[in-house]
Amino acid sequence: MKRSLIVLLAIFSIASVSVAQKSMEEKGEFNYQDTKIKQKKKVESYRLVQEFLLNASTLDLSESQRQQLDDIKEEYLYPMIQKEADFQISEMRVSDMLKEPDFNPEKIKRAIETSINLTRENAIMSIDALDAIRKVVGIDNFNKLRGVMNLTTGGMIESDDKEKDNQNSSNGQNKSL
């Protein structure tokens, strides 16, 4: 009888937690700490642009092209780094607000929205910056940079050849040496 009661209580407890989690998801509430952990795995978009610019300096470019790359740093890279710092500050503020026993959910949601907007703005700026770099160095040099980036970023960017090799091996068309 005691065993049955304990099992029944355990099942009830698990079901209650499950219902509570589902209710929070429906209301749009979520565990910010879980989100924060997932965000740590992301690569900051400014780092990709920074790596492209650093590697572009090794290319045989004209003085005009080098000046244009410096202009890209001013227009894109430095503002992106500032936005990343603002994002980190916003994230710390949210964490501090959550520690307060009488926190204001609306204030926290606005702060999270600020963090999301900063991340979105940086992502868009990184695309624009990479496009600007590609226009300055040309497509052939940009593809060379992509190949170098594959080595320095631990495979963050796959070159076209690597993608083709992966496709061929998945189709059973990989040739043996």
Image (cartoon, grey):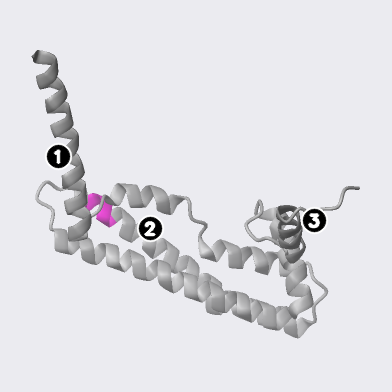
On the rendered image, what quadrant is the N terminus found in? top left
Q: Position of residue 125 (x, y in %)?
A: 50, 75
Point out the residue furthest to the bottom here: 64
The three-letter amino acid code for the residue at tag 2 is Gln
Counting from the top left corner in percent of width and height, residue 24 is at: 19, 53
Q: How many marks?
A: 3
* Disc nearer the start of the sequence (3/2): 2
Q: Which residue is mark 3?
A: 173
Mark pair 3, 2: CA separation: 46 Å
- Classify mark 2: residues with Cα within 10 Å, few (<14), some (14-19) or many (20+): some
Residue depth check, mark 2 versus mark 1: number of the one nearer the observer = 1
Circle 1: is it few (<14), some (14-19), or many (20+) Cα within 10 Å? few
Point out the tag, 1 or 3, that comes first from the N-terminus.
Answer: 1
Name the secondary structure under disc 1: helix
Residue closest to the eye, 1 or 13: 1
Indicate which disc, 2 or 1, sits on the residue closer to the N terminus.
1
Residue 54 drawn at (x, y percent):
68, 65
